[in-house]
Amino acid sequence: MTASPAAPGHLSPLLKQSSGVVAERGEGAYLIGADGRRYLDFTSGIGVTATGHCHPKVVEAAQRQAATLIHGQYAIVRHDPLLQLAERLSERMPGPIDRIFFSNAGTEACEAALRLARQATGRPNIIVFQGGFHGRTMGSLSMTSSSVGLRAGVQPMMGGVVVAPFPNARRYGWDEEETAAFCLRELDHILATQTMPAEAAAFFVEPIQGEAGYIPAGRTFLQGLRERADRHGILLIADEVQCGYGRSGAFWAHEHFGVQPDLVITAKGLASGFPLSAFGASEALMGRGWPSSQGGTYGGNAVSCAAALATLEVIDEEGLVENAREQGALLRRRLDALAQEEPALAAVQGRGLMHGAELVDAQGRPDGDRAARVLQEMEARQVLMIRCGPYGQIVRWLPPLIVTSAEIERAVDAFAEALRATA
């Protein structure tokens, strides 16, 4: 039997589960419940289990490392997995980025990037974009606007954060180029009315927004940010916590749009489920931060670093970036075709293995209740999904990078059945 999400035992009642599954183990793209049922997992732990559940190479690396050194606190000592991973990760970073800072979660890496941006530039303000999600700790939360519920009851937020429009073409009702041009004009207006360029430390942007509904920023918009960053001495920070590491069908999502950020943040799929996050900057930029301004207890944990090294090997050896691109194209074709048949499926957007399918009611309004029922119907068909969007109206497609065509087909078939069952 599965446990009810409303009966979490001694867990905090403020923590809500999206399913009733009690997971006993994981294998590849599947979670096996305590009742023995096999669930096709299209949540990937919110994009974390990139190589699937318990990939043998990752498991072996973690077991081997745990038998020799579990944790060597990296403000005290260095260890080989830490040094190897810093080298391997710097090789994957764009342009001159060659220095890596490690932490535990994406929000901590975002906080550290925010701190470096202010210290390195001597400027107080950060420009973020409507719908962005950068974390739940106070600095990162202050840069987050994907859902009002995240901020509820904890206002006021940190000062010095200015929110600019993001090119969500569906929301504005224009085509992508017209939307990008509007957002860049509004950004210029913000630089003339809310923060002088000389007081702006950084643009903080997701190349593909996650929690807002998997919305690509687009080439015109990101290149416009790069041009303004160069003109005004503002840093361009790419938050690739969810969209990076092969998820979009490129190793970094910003590669789709022909831009080179000054700083790249990564987490989620970095270590296949072990807690680890990082950001990369050039030696020159990192050197402009203040001494001892970076740290943390568990960042760069030896077992997590060993798992991350194995994850990179699996991504390369199994061609998972290419698989994300190919399977993502199949997923998009199937969802686009389904949207032609189902009036409630109003929009499909995203790249690679991160897509959002937006549900609306008969009046065209966001339908979060329908999306929640669809997820329940899919769980009954042994496919696990989650929602996003400001109204919970978007069903998000986030399978592991190892997903097969047959698994894509099965999940979309279940989605089609769930849509009919909830009509």
Image (cartoon, rainbow, N blue to C red):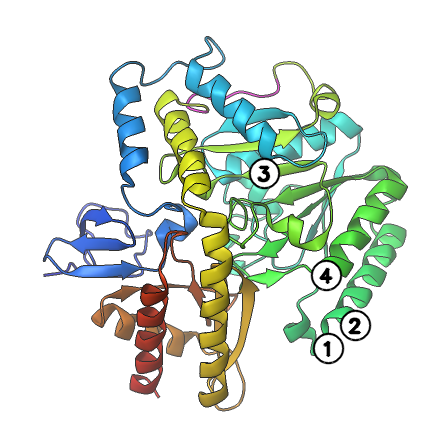
Give me the residue at 33% from left, 86% from top: 420
Which of disc 3 and disc 4 is earlier in sequence?
Answer: 4
Which quadrant of the rendered structure holds the C terminus? Answer: bottom left
Q: Which mark is residue 265?
A: 3
Q: Position of residue 336 (x, y in %)?
A: 50, 78
Give SS at disc 1: loop
Q: Is residue 164 left or right of residue 417?
A: right
The alpha-carbon separation of the residues under discs 3 and 1 comes to 30 Å
The stretch drawn in magenta includes residue 355 = no
Q: Which residue is mark 4?
A: 165
Amino acid type, mark 3 = Ile
Which of disc 2 and disc 3 is earlier in sequence?
Answer: 2
Estimate how packed mark 2 is, as few (under 14), some (14 to 19) or many (20 or more) residues with alpha carbons within 10 Å. some
Amino acid type, mark 1 = Trp
Q: Which residue is mark 1?
A: 174
The alpha-carbon separation of the residues under discs 4 and 1 comes to 14 Å
Q: Which mark is residue 178?
A: 2
Residue 286 sits in quarter = top right
Amino acid type, mark 4 = Pro
Point out the stretch of residues depicted in magenta: 293-299
Which of disc 1 and disc 4 is earlier in sequence?
Answer: 4
Give me the residue at 81% from left, 54% from top: 224
